[in-house]
Image (cartoon, rainbow, N blue to C red):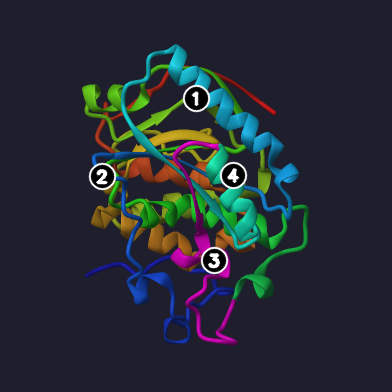
Amino acid sequence: EVPQEPVSQAFIVQKAALVTAETQQIKPLEPTLGVRDAIFSLVRGGSYHADFKDFIKSRKCLRETLQNESQSTPFDEIAFHEGNVPENVQRELESEINGLRFVDARLFGAFGGLHEVKDAWRPWERIRKPGEYPTGYRHMCRFMSMQWFRALAKYEYAMRIDDDVCMHRLLDPFNAMRQQGAIYGYGLRTEEKHEFTVQTLQPWLELYASSRKLTPTIPPLDAQSMYFTNVFISKTSWWWGPTVQRFLGAVYRSGSIYEHRWGDAPLQTAALHLHADPGSIIHVPMDYTHL
């Protein structure tokens, strides 16, 4: 007998009312010919070129660092946005930053999506508790937890480097992952400081694991300890595994990304510690600052 998914009573998914990227079968992005890997970010919006000065500096830092470290693995660079970057600004930045490609994340169901039925049931405003984190932030948490790899499914490895990160040292991360057969690489481990996330996520994880008789492959299953996800690299195909998809589906159905502000970092960490093979997660040496 298959146990029922733990669900929040405040969030009952009405699948018939939603037409998302998954049901529309939106095709993932096509890599450039001969390219297997991608570096991606979710950029802050802006109406003018000047609004992206930090992003431009971030990408200049990245290219200078990779050149200094003799980066040899080619990659595509994807800048996801939520429909808040004008076309003319996109074209200006793409011409300025070699290999850059802007992609609307809503095409893949993020930030409300572009494929929902008009006036479809949208639970997040109803269940989001007042606080310092707006709905858009929680959309971002969902995108970075369970939607980014849908867009990048045709790439073998994808690396997130946020748009305010200035990289000072980074050896070829794609080569390092392949050499060690890794599925996930992190730059920093840290502590979840959002107290309500820890208070609500920890018992939910324990219920999820016990109800399925799961033993974490990389113990402990600790909501307070996490990989810092403003920079990470991962094998995209790993996230499509049936056990991982089952876990992420249960997280989504719980509604707690929106209700309790569960972030992408503790959720990624939990998925990895539940299902990744021991030894498949590596530390990627790097130095960076925030702009």
Q: Quadrant of the C terminus?
A: top right
Tell me where residue 77 appears, x and y as whole percent.
44, 41
Q: Amino acid at mark 2?
A: Leu
The mark nearer the N terminus, 1 or 2, is 2
Q: How far apart are the alpha carbons under marks 1 and 2?
A: 21 Å
Q: Say if mark 1 contacts mark 2, CB within 8 Å.
A: no
Q: Nearer the viewer, mark 1 or mark 4?
A: 4
Q: Which disc, if any, is residue 63? A: 1
Q: Nearer the viewer, mark 2 or mark 3?
A: 2
The mark nearer the N terminus, 1 or 3, is 1
- Which residue shows up at 28% across the image and 51% down it? 154
Tell me where residue 30 appears, x and y as whole percent.
31, 54
Q: Nearer the viewer, residue 3 or 254?
A: 254
Q: How far apart are the alpha carbons under marks 1 and 3?
A: 39 Å
Q: Say how many tags the image has.
A: 4
Q: Quadrant of residue 53?
A: top right
Q: Nearer the viewer, residue 75 or 138?
A: 75
Q: Amino acid at mark 3?
A: Gly
- Which residue shows up at 65% across the image and 60% down it? 84
Q: Say if mark 1 contacts mark 4, CB within 8 Å.
A: no
Q: Nearer the viewer, residue 35 or 10?
A: 35
Which residue range is magenta in the image?
97-122
The mark nearer the N terminus, 4 or 2, is 2
The residue singled out by tag 2 in the image is 33
Q: How far apart are the alpha carbons under marks 4 and 2?
A: 22 Å
The residue singled out by tag 3 in the image is 255
